[in-house]
Image (cartoon, helix red, strand yellow):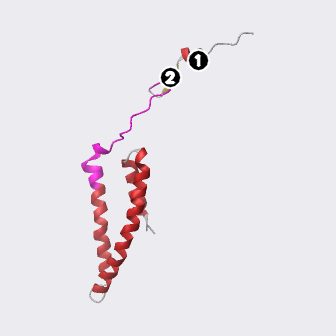
């Protein structure tokens, strides 16, 4: 039921950590790594199952649990140990000239409204 949810969560968390202009690089690295990891995981699971199916057939479940601990430790490290490093690093954009934001209200500068010359008839 929850198959693949870990990948979606990892992508979501990773996209929040990097800058907006680095999202393409992040997605390409994640796509390549997902495909390369599959090349090694399937043979590893087959090897573990063949070696242990007569003594402990469920050992590949333990292998999955151990491999799930690695991302868990990394996520804990990112969010608890070093949260200050991953604060938004992009500079905040200032509003266009003539508009100032004070608190939650939006004010328009009256000098900017009347700056255009009126048509003479």
**Image quadrant where one finds the C terminus:** top right
| Percent position of residue 94, x then y | 45, 28
Looking at the rendered structure, which numbered label has been put on residue 113? 1
Q: CA distance from mark 1 to mark 2?
A: 11 Å
Residue plotted at (26% across, 47% down)? 82
- In this picture, residue 100 sits left or right of residue 47: right
| Percent position of residue 66, x then y | 28, 70
**Range of magenta residues:** 76-102
Q: Secondary structure at mark 1?
A: helix
Instruction: Examine the structure image and report whether residue 17 is included in the region drawn in magenta.
Output: no
Give above or below for 14 relative to 68: above
Residue under label 2, please give it: 97
- In this picture, residue 38 sits left or right of residue 116: left
Cβ–Cβ under 8 Å for marks 1 and 2:
no
| Percent position of residue 72, x then y | 30, 60
Give the farthest residue toward the left: 81
Residue plotted at (39% across, 65% down)? 34
Give above or below for 51 relative to 34: below
Looking at the rendered structure, which numbered label has been put on residue 17? none
Give above or below for 115 relative to 48: above
| Percent position of residue 84, x then y | 28, 42
Give above or below for 78 relative to 102: below
Residue plotted at (41% across, 33% down)? 92
Give the farthest residue toward the bottom: 54
Q: Residues within 10 Å of mark 1 (few under 14, many from 20)?
A: few
């Amino acid at each position: 039921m929850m198959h693949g949810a870990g990948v979606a969560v990892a992508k979501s968390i990773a996209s929040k950590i990097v800058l907006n202009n680095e999202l393409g690089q992040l997605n390409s690295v994640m796509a390549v790594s997902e495909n390369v990891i599959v090349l090694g995981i399937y043979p590893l699971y087959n090897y573990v199952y063949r070696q242990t199916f007569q003594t402990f057939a469920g050992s590949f479940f333990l292998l999955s649990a151990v491999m799930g601990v690695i991302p868990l430790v990394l996520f804990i490290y990112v969010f608890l140990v070093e949260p200050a490093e991953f604060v938004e690093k992009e500079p905040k954009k200032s509003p266009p000239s003539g508009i100032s934001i004070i608190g939650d209200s939006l004010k328009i500068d009256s000098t900017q409204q009347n700056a255009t010359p009126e048509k003479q008839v």
